């Protein structure tokens, strides 16, 4: 019972922190507007780790690699903590365990990225119906623009209805099936 509560707390705090780091990475990568409440919140929450990491780890071609690496490390710590609380013995196979956990953390980052895009597309579609000039709209446009733009180039609106969000959501669901399959295969190492 105590282990389940500790796993829940670990998953909540490290999972949310990893999500905040990942959102910050993508907002910088996609050049989302800096002056909005979400950006300011993410900067305030993650700056205490990102600034020192930037002194050690350089950015690469405009990508904030320190932030991405910190998100991966948070996921790695989360997975290691959960496995330890579940009674996994790392002492005998430390190399295989760390390699497997590193791969699982990478898969979790990919899965979290897909969920971020999924939620952003749904939020943008709903806002476009009810409040297209919402303060959140420019941020959502920067997140979804690269994905929706690919579909919009090939599929024009049909009867003034943009179907590109539907196709992006279907594509994300298919990718989530693949990622979940890979995750299950990696999990068999444990």
Image: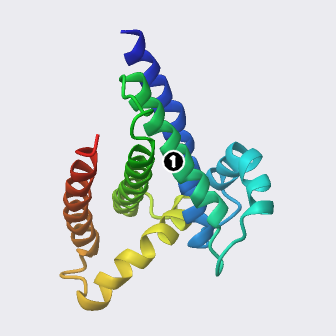
Instruction: Name the quadrant of the N terminus.
Output: top left
- Residue at (42, 56) in percent of width and height: 106
In the displayed structure image, the side of residue 39 where residue 131 appears, left or right? left
Residue where numbered disc 1 is placed: 19
Residue 33: x and y in percent read 64, 67
User: Can you name the residue that lies furthest to the bottom here?
Assistant: 154
Residue at image x 47%, y 31%? Answer: 81
Alpha-carbon neighbours of circle 1 within 10 Å: few (<14), some, or many (≥20)?
A: many
Q: How is the image coloured?
A: rainbow
The percent position of residue 161, horizontal first and vertical second, equals 24, 75
| Residue 159, quarter of picture | bottom left
Q: Name above or below for residue 12 compared with residue 144.
A: above
Q: x%, y% of residue 190?
A: 29, 40
| Count of numbered circles on the image | 1
User: Is residue 11 shown above or below 150?
Assistant: above
Q: In percent of the image, x 74 and y 49: which residue is there? A: 47
Of all residues, the one furthest to the top in this rendering is 1
- Compare residues 48 and 91 and report the one nearer the observer: 91
Left or right: 107, with 16 as reference point: left
Residue 157 is left or right of residue 25, and the answer is: left
Q: Residue at x 43, y 50 (%)?
A: 105
Task: Tell me the element at label 1.
Answer: helix
């Amino acid at each position: 019972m105590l282990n389940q509560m500790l796993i829940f707390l670990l998953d909540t705090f490290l999972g949310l922190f990893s999500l905040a780091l990942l959102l910050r990475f993508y907002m910088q990568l996609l050049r989302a507007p800096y002056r909005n409440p979400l950006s300011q919140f993410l900067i305030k929450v993650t700056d205490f780790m990102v600034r020192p990491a930037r002194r050690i780890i350089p950015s690469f071609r405009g990508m904030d690699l320190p932030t991405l690496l910190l998100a991966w490390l948070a996921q790695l710590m989360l997975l290691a903590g959960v496995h330890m609380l579940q009674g996994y013995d790392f002492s005998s196979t430390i190399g295989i365990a760390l390699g497997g956990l590193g791969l699982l953390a990478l898969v979790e980052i990919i899965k979290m990225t897909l969920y971020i895009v999924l939620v952003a597309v749904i939020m943008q579609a709903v806002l476009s119906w009810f409040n297209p000039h919402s303060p959140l709209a420019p941020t959502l446009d920067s997140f979804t623009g690269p994905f929706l733009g690919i579909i919009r180039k090939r599929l024009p609106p049909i009867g003034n209805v943009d179907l590109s969000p539907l196709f992006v959501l279907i594509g994300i669901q298919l990718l989530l099936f693949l990622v979940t399959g890979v995750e299950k295969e990696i999990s068999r190492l444990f």
